[in-house]
Amino acid sequence: MTNQKNPREIDLMRAAGKIAAAARVEAGKLITVGATTQSIDQKVHDFIVSQGAIPAFLGYNGYPASVCISINEEVIHGIPSMRRLKEGDVVSIDVGAMKDGYIGDCAATFIAGTGSADSERLIKITTECFYEGLRFARVGHRVSDISRAIQRHAENNGYSVVREYVGHGVGSKIHEPPEVPNFVERPRHKADPRLLPGMTLAIEPMINFGKANIIVLDDKWTVVTADGQISAHYENTVLITQGDPEILTICEDAT
Protein backbone atom coordinates (compact mmCIF):
# COMPACT_ATOMS: atom_id res chain seq x y z
CA MET A 1 0.00 0.00 0.00
CA THR A 2 1.29 3.46 -0.90
CA ASN A 3 -1.04 5.52 1.32
CA GLN A 4 -1.59 7.98 -1.56
CA LYS A 5 -4.60 10.27 -1.31
CA ASN A 6 -6.63 11.83 -4.09
CA PRO A 7 -7.28 15.61 -4.24
CA ARG A 8 -10.61 15.33 -2.41
CA GLU A 9 -9.07 13.29 0.38
CA ILE A 10 -6.19 15.75 0.67
CA ASP A 11 -8.63 18.64 1.09
CA LEU A 12 -10.41 16.71 3.84
CA MET A 13 -7.10 16.02 5.55
CA ARG A 14 -6.18 19.70 5.39
CA ALA A 15 -9.42 20.54 7.20
CA ALA A 16 -8.84 17.88 9.87
CA GLY A 17 -5.20 18.91 10.21
CA LYS A 18 -6.07 22.53 10.89
CA ILE A 19 -8.41 21.50 13.70
CA ALA A 20 -5.81 19.18 15.24
CA ALA A 21 -3.18 21.90 15.06
CA ALA A 22 -5.50 24.44 16.66
CA ALA A 23 -6.28 21.91 19.40
CA ARG A 24 -2.55 21.51 20.02
CA VAL A 25 -2.25 25.28 20.42
CA GLU A 26 -5.19 25.35 22.83
CA ALA A 27 -3.62 22.57 24.87
CA GLY A 28 -0.34 24.44 25.04
CA LYS A 29 -2.09 27.47 26.49
CA LEU A 30 -3.60 25.29 29.20
CA ILE A 31 -0.29 23.89 30.43
CA THR A 32 0.11 25.95 33.57
CA VAL A 33 1.30 25.17 37.07
CA GLY A 34 -1.59 23.70 39.08
CA ALA A 35 -3.69 22.61 36.11
CA THR A 36 -4.84 18.99 36.10
CA THR A 37 -4.22 16.93 32.99
CA GLN A 38 -7.85 15.82 33.14
CA SER A 39 -9.02 19.43 32.88
CA ILE A 40 -6.74 19.99 29.89
CA ASP A 41 -8.13 16.89 28.21
CA GLN A 42 -11.73 17.97 28.75
CA LYS A 43 -11.15 21.48 27.39
CA VAL A 44 -9.34 20.17 24.31
CA HIS A 45 -12.11 17.63 23.77
CA ASP A 46 -14.70 20.41 23.90
CA PHE A 47 -12.66 22.54 21.50
CA ILE A 48 -12.39 19.75 18.91
CA VAL A 49 -16.13 19.09 19.11
CA SER A 50 -16.85 22.83 18.77
CA GLN A 51 -15.04 22.72 15.42
CA GLY A 52 -17.36 20.04 14.09
CA ALA A 53 -14.80 17.28 14.53
CA ILE A 54 -14.34 14.18 16.68
CA PRO A 55 -11.41 13.52 19.02
CA ALA A 56 -9.65 10.79 17.04
CA PHE A 57 -7.98 9.15 20.03
CA LEU A 58 -11.04 8.81 22.27
CA GLY A 59 -11.90 5.11 22.44
CA TYR A 60 -9.16 4.13 19.97
CA ASN A 61 -8.18 0.59 20.98
CA GLY A 62 -9.83 1.42 24.30
CA TYR A 63 -7.89 4.63 25.02
CA PRO A 64 -9.99 6.47 27.64
CA ALA A 65 -9.30 10.13 26.78
CA SER A 66 -9.15 12.61 23.91
CA VAL A 67 -5.52 13.70 24.39
CA CYS A 68 -2.36 11.84 25.33
CA ILE A 69 -0.64 13.95 28.01
CA SER A 70 2.79 12.65 29.00
CA ILE A 71 4.83 14.26 31.78
CA ASN A 72 8.61 14.26 32.31
CA GLU A 73 9.82 10.64 31.98
CA GLU A 74 6.56 9.67 30.24
CA VAL A 75 7.36 9.32 26.55
CA ILE A 76 3.89 8.90 25.02
CA HIS A 77 0.33 7.74 25.75
CA GLY A 78 0.06 9.32 29.20
CA ILE A 79 -3.56 9.12 30.41
CA PRO A 80 -5.09 12.37 31.74
CA SER A 81 -5.91 12.31 35.45
CA MET A 82 -6.30 14.57 38.46
CA ARG A 83 -2.52 14.97 38.61
CA ARG A 84 -1.61 18.65 38.87
CA LEU A 85 1.23 20.09 36.85
CA LYS A 86 4.23 21.35 38.80
CA GLU A 87 6.76 24.08 38.04
CA GLY A 88 9.15 22.86 35.37
CA ASP A 89 7.17 19.79 34.31
CA VAL A 90 7.89 18.72 30.73
CA VAL A 91 4.49 18.02 29.15
CA SER A 92 3.99 16.31 25.80
CA ILE A 93 0.61 16.77 24.12
CA ASP A 94 -0.46 14.35 21.38
CA VAL A 95 -3.83 15.09 19.79
CA GLY A 96 -5.84 13.93 16.80
CA ALA A 97 -9.01 15.25 15.21
CA MET A 98 -11.29 13.45 12.76
CA LYS A 99 -13.36 15.57 10.38
CA ASP A 100 -15.54 14.04 7.66
CA GLY A 101 -13.80 10.72 8.05
CA TYR A 102 -10.19 11.93 7.85
CA ILE A 103 -7.65 12.55 10.59
CA GLY A 104 -5.05 15.15 11.51
CA ASP A 105 -2.47 13.95 14.05
CA CYS A 106 0.09 16.15 15.80
CA ALA A 107 2.09 16.56 19.00
CA ALA A 108 4.37 19.01 20.76
CA THR A 109 6.13 19.32 24.10
CA PHE A 110 5.70 22.25 26.47
CA ILE A 111 6.91 23.28 29.92
CA ALA A 112 4.69 24.22 32.85
CA GLY A 113 6.03 27.50 34.20
CA THR A 114 9.81 27.82 33.90
CA GLY A 115 11.84 24.81 32.89
CA SER A 116 15.47 23.84 33.22
CA ALA A 117 18.03 24.49 30.50
CA ASP A 118 18.17 20.73 29.88
CA SER A 119 14.43 20.58 29.33
CA GLU A 120 14.42 23.57 27.01
CA ARG A 121 17.26 22.14 24.93
CA LEU A 122 15.68 18.69 24.63
CA ILE A 123 12.43 20.20 23.37
CA LYS A 124 14.31 22.39 20.90
CA ILE A 125 16.35 19.52 19.48
CA THR A 126 13.29 17.24 19.26
CA THR A 127 11.46 19.87 17.21
CA GLU A 128 14.55 20.32 15.04
CA CYS A 129 14.62 16.54 14.49
CA PHE A 130 11.20 16.77 12.85
CA TYR A 131 12.37 19.51 10.50
CA GLU A 132 15.55 17.62 9.68
CA GLY A 133 13.41 14.67 8.65
CA LEU A 134 11.02 16.94 6.75
CA ARG A 135 13.86 17.94 4.42
CA PHE A 136 13.72 14.43 2.98
CA ALA A 137 9.92 14.15 2.79
CA ARG A 138 10.06 14.47 -0.97
CA VAL A 139 9.23 12.39 -4.01
CA GLY A 140 12.03 9.98 -4.82
CA HIS A 141 13.44 9.71 -1.32
CA ARG A 142 12.74 6.70 0.85
CA VAL A 143 11.17 6.58 4.30
CA SER A 144 14.61 5.68 5.67
CA ASP A 145 15.99 9.03 4.50
CA ILE A 146 13.57 10.75 6.89
CA SER A 147 14.50 8.27 9.61
CA ARG A 148 18.24 8.74 9.15
CA ALA A 149 18.03 12.53 9.35
CA ILE A 150 16.04 12.39 12.59
CA GLN A 151 18.36 9.86 14.20
CA ARG A 152 21.50 11.70 13.18
CA HIS A 153 20.33 15.03 14.60
CA ALA A 154 19.21 13.48 17.89
CA GLU A 155 22.35 11.44 18.44
CA ASN A 156 24.70 14.20 17.30
CA ASN A 157 23.21 16.28 20.11
CA GLY A 158 23.73 13.57 22.72
CA TYR A 159 20.19 12.20 22.89
CA SER A 160 18.64 8.82 22.10
CA VAL A 161 15.77 7.75 19.86
CA VAL A 162 12.88 5.54 20.99
CA ARG A 163 12.79 2.35 18.89
CA GLU A 164 9.57 0.63 19.88
CA TYR A 165 7.23 3.38 18.66
CA VAL A 166 7.41 5.06 15.27
CA GLY A 167 5.68 7.47 12.94
CA HIS A 168 3.15 6.19 10.42
CA GLY A 169 0.87 6.86 7.54
CA VAL A 170 -2.37 8.59 8.47
CA GLY A 171 -5.64 9.21 6.66
CA SER A 172 -9.06 7.71 7.28
CA LYS A 173 -7.33 5.66 10.00
CA ILE A 174 -4.95 6.86 12.68
CA HIS A 175 -2.34 4.29 11.70
CA GLU A 176 -1.84 3.44 8.04
CA PRO A 177 1.18 2.13 6.15
CA PRO A 178 4.01 2.87 5.95
CA GLU A 179 5.76 2.94 9.29
CA VAL A 180 8.08 5.95 9.65
CA PRO A 181 10.79 5.05 12.20
CA ASN A 182 12.96 7.71 13.79
CA PHE A 183 16.03 5.52 13.27
CA VAL A 184 17.51 3.30 10.55
CA GLU A 185 17.50 -0.42 11.17
CA ARG A 186 20.62 -2.39 10.38
CA PRO A 187 20.41 -4.73 8.65
CA ARG A 188 17.34 -3.31 6.94
CA HIS A 189 14.64 -5.97 6.84
CA LYS A 190 11.40 -4.00 6.80
CA ALA A 191 9.71 -2.26 3.90
CA ASP A 192 11.36 1.02 2.97
CA PRO A 193 9.09 2.50 0.32
CA ARG A 194 9.94 5.40 -1.92
CA LEU A 195 7.88 8.51 -1.25
CA LEU A 196 5.15 9.27 -3.76
CA PRO A 197 2.96 12.34 -4.26
CA GLY A 198 -0.23 12.18 -2.22
CA MET A 199 1.22 10.14 0.62
CA THR A 200 0.28 11.49 4.07
CA LEU A 201 2.65 10.71 6.92
CA ALA A 202 2.70 11.41 10.64
CA ILE A 203 6.38 12.17 11.26
CA GLU A 204 6.98 12.14 15.01
CA PRO A 205 10.38 12.11 16.71
CA MET A 206 10.28 10.74 20.28
CA ILE A 207 13.61 11.69 21.81
CA ASN A 208 14.99 10.78 25.24
CA PHE A 209 17.40 12.82 27.32
CA GLY A 210 19.06 9.63 28.53
CA LYS A 211 19.00 6.12 27.10
CA ALA A 212 16.56 4.82 24.53
CA ASN A 213 15.11 2.02 26.68
CA ILE A 214 11.44 2.30 27.59
CA ILE A 215 8.90 0.54 29.83
CA VAL A 216 5.12 0.29 29.42
CA LEU A 217 3.34 0.83 32.75
CA ASP A 218 0.66 -1.43 34.22
CA ASP A 219 -2.12 0.71 32.70
CA LYS A 220 -0.97 -0.79 29.34
CA TRP A 221 -0.76 2.68 27.80
CA THR A 222 1.77 4.96 29.47
CA VAL A 223 5.29 4.56 28.09
CA VAL A 224 8.15 5.82 30.28
CA THR A 225 11.91 5.98 29.97
CA ALA A 226 13.58 3.07 31.76
CA ASP A 227 16.17 5.38 33.34
CA GLY A 228 13.63 7.96 34.52
CA GLN A 229 15.08 10.74 32.37
CA ILE A 230 12.84 13.22 30.57
CA SER A 231 11.54 12.70 27.05
CA ALA A 232 10.08 14.98 24.36
CA HIS A 233 7.76 14.43 21.39
CA TYR A 234 7.01 16.50 18.29
CA GLU A 235 4.74 15.51 15.41
CA ASN A 236 2.97 16.81 12.34
CA THR A 237 0.92 15.26 9.57
CA VAL A 238 2.78 15.84 6.32
CA LEU A 239 1.67 15.62 2.68
CA ILE A 240 4.18 14.50 0.05
CA THR A 241 3.78 16.68 -3.04
CA GLN A 242 5.57 17.08 -6.36
CA GLY A 243 7.61 19.82 -4.68
CA ASP A 244 8.06 20.92 -1.09
CA PRO A 245 6.29 18.84 1.58
CA GLU A 246 3.16 20.41 3.05
CA ILE A 247 2.53 20.36 6.80
CA LEU A 248 -1.20 19.68 7.16
CA THR A 249 -1.37 20.17 10.94
CA ILE A 250 -0.85 23.88 10.87
CA CYS A 251 -2.87 26.94 11.83
CA GLU A 252 -1.94 30.61 12.26
CA ASP A 253 -0.68 30.09 15.82
CA ALA A 254 0.38 26.44 15.44
CA THR A 255 3.44 25.25 17.32
Image: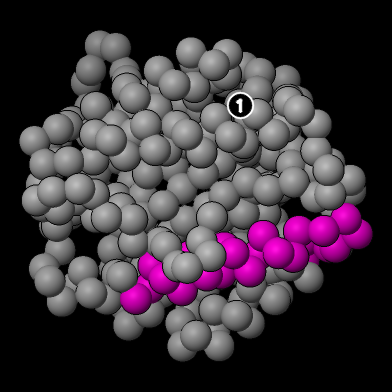
Image coordinates of residue 80 in percent, x first then y, are 73, 60
Figure quadrant of residue 3: bottom left
Name the residue carrying label 1: 208
The answer to whether residue 210 of the structure is visible from this angle is yes
Side of 171 where 9 appears, left or right = left
Residue drawn at the location 29% of the way across and 70% of the way down: 13
Image coordinates of residue 175 in percent, x first then y, are 35, 54
Image coordinates of residue 62 in percent, x first then y, are 55, 63
The residues colored magenta run 15-38
Image position of 168 with respect to 191: above or below: below
The answer to whether residue 102 of the structure is visible from this angle is no
- Badge 1 amino acid: Asn
Question: Of helix, strand and loop, which mostly describes the magenta segment?
Answer: helix
Single out the residue that lies furthest toward the front. Answer: 252
Figure quadrant of residue 137: top left
Side of 245 where 230 appears, left or right = right
Looking at the image, what colour scheme do you see? one colour
Locate the C terminus by quadrant.
bottom right
Side of 46 where 186 appears, left or right = left
- Judging depth in this view, the residue of 30 and 80 nearest the camera is 30
Residue drawn at the location 23% of the way across and 17% of the way down: 188
